[in-house]
Image (spheres, rainbow, N blue to C red):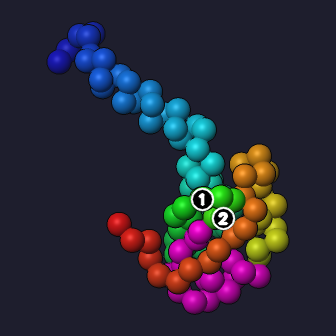
Amino acid sequence: MAADSPQPVSAILSTVLRQMEQQHSPLAAIQGQWRALVGKRLAAHTTPVSLRRGRLVVYVERPGDGFILNYQRGVLLEQVRALTQGKVEELVIRPGPPTA
């Protein structure tokens, strides 16, 4: 299609809905800021994977990284709560990479 050709409504809606979900989803906000929250090294081996009923679940690939996150739990929870307008009440750290 040429650049100025009309696009199907379904393509436009899909893009708009995805952008709205990312803007309004607390988990997407956390995932988008994860590197800034925990730093480059920890972000490379940890992944926030779910947020349900105030529980943020983070998978860690290495035991030492889980220890570091646990040590930083208080500060990290404050930052995540500020980012999500208080939607996170608890941080759950689980070993292993996220399942696809």
- Judge left or right: residue 38 versus residue 19: right
- Residue 67 painted magenta: yes
Q: Amino acid at mark 2?
A: Arg
- Which residue position holds label 2? 55
**Which of the 4 quarters of the picture holds residue 60?**
bottom right
Helix or strand or loop: what does disc 2 sit on?
strand
- Judge left or right: residue 28 versus residue 85: left
* Residue at x 75% of width, y 62% of height: 89
Camera-side residue of 53 and 82 = 53
User: What residue span does the magenta drawing correspond to?
Assistant: 57-71
Total of numbered circles in the picture?
Answer: 2
**Callout 1 environment at 10 Å: few (<14), some (14 to 19), or many (20+)?**
many
* Residue at x 53% of width, y 32% of height: 20
Residues at marks 2 and 1 touching, judged by CB atoms closer than 8 Å: yes
Q: Is residue 61 above or below residue 91?
A: below
Q: Is residue 96 above or below residue 91?
A: below
Name of the residue lying farthest toward the bottom:
63
**Rendered location of residue 47, percent (x, y):** 53, 68
**Rendered location of residue 58, percent (x, y):** 58, 71
**Rendered location of residue 12, percent (x, y):** 35, 22
**Callout 2 environment at 10 Å: few (<14), some (14 to 19), or many (20+)?**
some
* Residue at x 38% of width, y 24% of height: 13
Residue 51 bears which disc, if any?
1
Q: Is residue 4 above or below residue 62?
A: above
Q: Is residue 80 above or below residue 15?
A: below
- Judge left or right: residue 9 versus residue 89: left
**Rendered location of residue 48, percent (x, y):** 56, 64
Helix or strand or loop: what does disc 1 sit on?
strand
Residue 42 bears which disc, if any?
none
Camera-side residue of 41 and 100 = 100
Name of the residue lying farthest toward the front:
53
